[in-house]
Each structure stands twice: as C-alpha cells, then as structure tokens.
Image (spheres, rainbow, N blue to C red):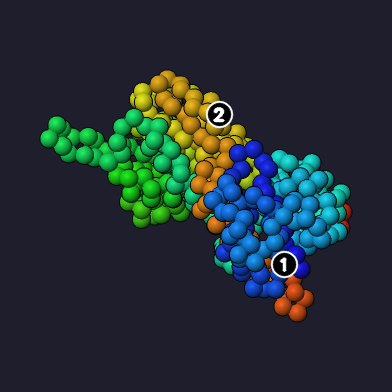
C-alpha cells in the first residue's frame, strides 16, 4: 500500500497535504509513503523531516509510481499522476461544481476522485472536515489582515493624551470562519457585532461576547440548509436584512463577510451604495472573494479603494498561514483514511455514507449524485 504526496502547483498554494506527523502515523499503519522533494518547503517543512518520519523523498514521477492513494490540497493535474496504479484514489479539493471538466477528466483517466470538500457535516466526520479546519484559520487571518489595513488601533486605549475609542467590527456570516473572526476581533479588543440568516447562531454570537444583529418577525429567518449550511432566503427576508445591515454598516470601522452557499456563487451582501455610507478609512475583508465575492467591487488579492473604504480579500486565505493550515489539512487526511482502515486488507475501505458523499468518479464514470442531478 503506497500513499503519494506531491508538491502543490496551483498558483498561490503554499500548503502541503502531509506533515512529518501524519507521515509517521501512516508508516505506523504499515503504509509506504512517498513525498515529492520540496513539497513542504513553503509550509516550513524540509525534506529531511519527511525522511526522518519514514517517507521516501524523490521526484514527482518516483513519488506517484505505483501509488494506491494520492493526497493533495488542490487536485493535481492528471499528467502528474502518470504511473499511479489503475483506479488509484486521489483525495483533495476538486471544486466539483465549477470544475466539472476536471472531474470528467479524472473519470476518463480511471481514477477514483475523492472530494474532501464534500465531506458530510456529521458528528463522526468532524475530524475529517477540511472546510471547517481551513475556515477556522481563514476567519482568524481575515481579522488580522483587516487590522493591518486599518489605520487605527482595535482596543480602547486610555492615555494621558486622551482616549482612543475601540474599533467597531461587524461579522457577516457566522459559520466556522465567522465564529473565529468574532473571537479574534474580541481578543484584539474591538466592539464586535455579527449577523447570519440562521437564527440558531444568535446564541453562539452572544456566547462569544458579541452583539447579534438580526431581522425579526420575517418569514424564513431559520435559514438552515442541508448539512448545516446556510441556504438562500426569501425576497422579503433579503429586503429586510438589507435595510437593517445598511443602517448598521454605516457605523462600522471593519466589516468581514464570510457567506458562501455550496455550489453557487457567493451571495451579494454589501453593495456599492452601502460602502458609500461607511466612514473613510474603514476596511472590508471579503472572505468569499474567490467565489465571486460578498462585496460589490472586491477583487481577489488586490486592495480596492471605493468611497475611501479599503476592500480586501485573498484568493486563498488559509494559504496565508501555510504551516498551521497544512498541519490541520494533513490531520484531516489522516483521520479520514485511518477511520476506514481495514487491517486485514491493509488499506482503507469506505462505507456508503461517507464514501458515496465524497466519491466523484469510479469505474471510468462520474458517480456523485450532487453532480448528476
């Protein structure tokens, strides 16, 4: 049984799919692990550390040769998989809804593509959930980046020269990233408020010491989609929310947007007209910029200034924290494969619930129901 770890080649990708910690654990299961030379350099992991953990380190071709499983962050180009065993598993981020051509190519190539972002949000799969682990870091980094772009301090400071008022921070979308953003902004001393379409998040916001901003008495406030994700709201709710948010945004110094709907473009939360109401020098961080953006006019990896407001957002926010992001992603991979490890077979054997959820291709065909519907 051989697991291969290739160097990430996507633009701006600094993470790596395995660390010496997880390599050692895989070796402990009796697995041969091969790592491409230089795979971990951008995540502060040297080749020697992989070798010490029990992996072989070599060229890309040697790494994938006869591999049963290839682990990645972003799905590797098919050309890199030449030499892997027929039907080999490839577990990585595939972005299946927008990159259907990649999924079809994997099917044609005879590989079994396992989409880690399709991991179901159920209790037993929490330790395998890459979206949660990476979103947690993204929420933290968004606050730090916004604080760096903001020309003032976050906490209240009382000095002999006068008082510096605490920054007002508004978090829009209270999933994993949003909750971490609230916690981080609070730790930095800001006055924090937050909103979400799911009424159940109100208590979570309050538990972190932030003020919930919610539309009341409008149909559709529950906003719960399948698997714990938010869903789109009624027109009535959207209109009421826009009015509430508009009045609140005008008073904020920092706004961080985190809203995403699986399989669809990011919902528009902030318009140009709303940006115009904010104070000059304010900052908006759009965590959804890579999926079309929550903020009108946001551009990935660029600072856009509109009406005196800085709008920022990274195409790949977790990659800005490569060491920790890699460590968490690698543990997600290990937790996934080890949970289904069959000692007699010497390999993982997936069950239907999780296997059917994440498997995109098998036997030369696209098989995932979410892509076939």
- Closer-to-camera residue (25/212): 25
Q: Residue 299 got which mark?
A: 2
Comparing 327 with 207, the one in front is 327
Q: Which residue is painted at 87% across and 49% down in the image?
A: 108
Q: Is residue 225 visible?
A: no
Give residue 57's position: percent from left, percent from top: 69, 57
Q: Residue furthest left?
A: 160
Identify the residue shown where x is 67% and y is 73%.
29
Q: CA distance from mark 1 to mark 2?
A: 43 Å
Secondary structure of the residue carrying tag 2 is loop
Q: Give the structural element (helix, strand or loop) at label 1.
A: strand
Residue that mark 1 sits on: 32
Question: For the point 40% across and 43% down, which residue is it?
Answer: 194
User: Is residue 1 in view?
Assistant: yes
Lateral position of residue 228 relative to residue 275, left or right: right
- Nearer to us in this view, 365 or 67: 67
Image quadrant of residue 101?
Answer: top right
Residue 218 in the image: above or below residue 113? above
- Say whether residue 73 is left or right of residue 276: right
Image mark for residue 323 = none
Q: Residue furthest front?
A: 48
- Crowding around mark 1 (Cα neighbors within 10 Å: few <14, some 14 to 19, many 20+) is some
């Amino acid at each position: 049984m051989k697991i291969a770890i290739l160097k990430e080649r996507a633009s701006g990708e600094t993470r790596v799919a395995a660390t010496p910690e997880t390599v050692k654990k895989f070796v402990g299961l009796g697995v041969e692990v091969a790592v491409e030379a230089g795979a971990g350099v951008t995540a502060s992991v040297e080749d020697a550390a992989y070798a010490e953990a029990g992996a072989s380190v070599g060229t890309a071709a040697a790494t994938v040769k006869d591999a049963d499983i290839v682990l990645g962050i972003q799905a590797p180009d098919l050309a890199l998989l030449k030499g892997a065993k027929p039907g080999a598993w490839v577990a990585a981020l595939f972005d299946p809804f927008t990159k259907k051509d990649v999924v079809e190519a994997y099917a044609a190539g005879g590989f079994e593509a396992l989409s880690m972002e399709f991991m179901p949000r159920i209790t037993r799969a929490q330790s395998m959930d890459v979206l949660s682990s990476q979103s947690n870091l993204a929420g933290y980094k968004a606050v730090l980046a916004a604080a760096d772009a903001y020309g003032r301090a976050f906490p209240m400071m009382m000095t002999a020269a006068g008082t510096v008022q605490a920054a007002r921070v508004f978090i829009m979308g209270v999933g994993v990233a949003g909750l971490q953003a609230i916690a981080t902004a609070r730790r930095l001393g800001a006055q924090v408020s937050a909103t979400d379409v799911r009424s159940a998040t109100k208590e979570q916001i309050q538990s972190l010491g932030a003020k919930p901003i919610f539309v009341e008495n409008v149909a559709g406030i529950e906003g719960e989609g399948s698997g714990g994700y938010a869903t789109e709201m009624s027109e009535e709710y959207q209109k009421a929310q826009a009015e509430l948010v508009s009045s609140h945004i005008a008073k904020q110094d920092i706004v961080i947007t985190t809203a995403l709907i699986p399989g669809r473009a990011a919902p528009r939360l902030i318009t140009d007209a709303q940006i115009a109401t904010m104070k000059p020098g304010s900052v908006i961080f759009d965590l959804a910029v890579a999926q079309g953006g929550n903020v009108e006019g946001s551009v990935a990896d660029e600072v856009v200034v509109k009406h005196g407001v800085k709008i920022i957002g990274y195409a790949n926010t977790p990659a800005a924290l490569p060491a920790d992001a890699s460590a968490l992603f690698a543990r997600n991979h290990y937790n996934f494969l080890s949970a289904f490890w069959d000692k007699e077979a010497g390999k993982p054997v997936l069950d239907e619930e999780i296997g059917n959820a994440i498997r995109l291709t098998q036997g030369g065909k696209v098989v995932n129901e979410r892509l076939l519907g």
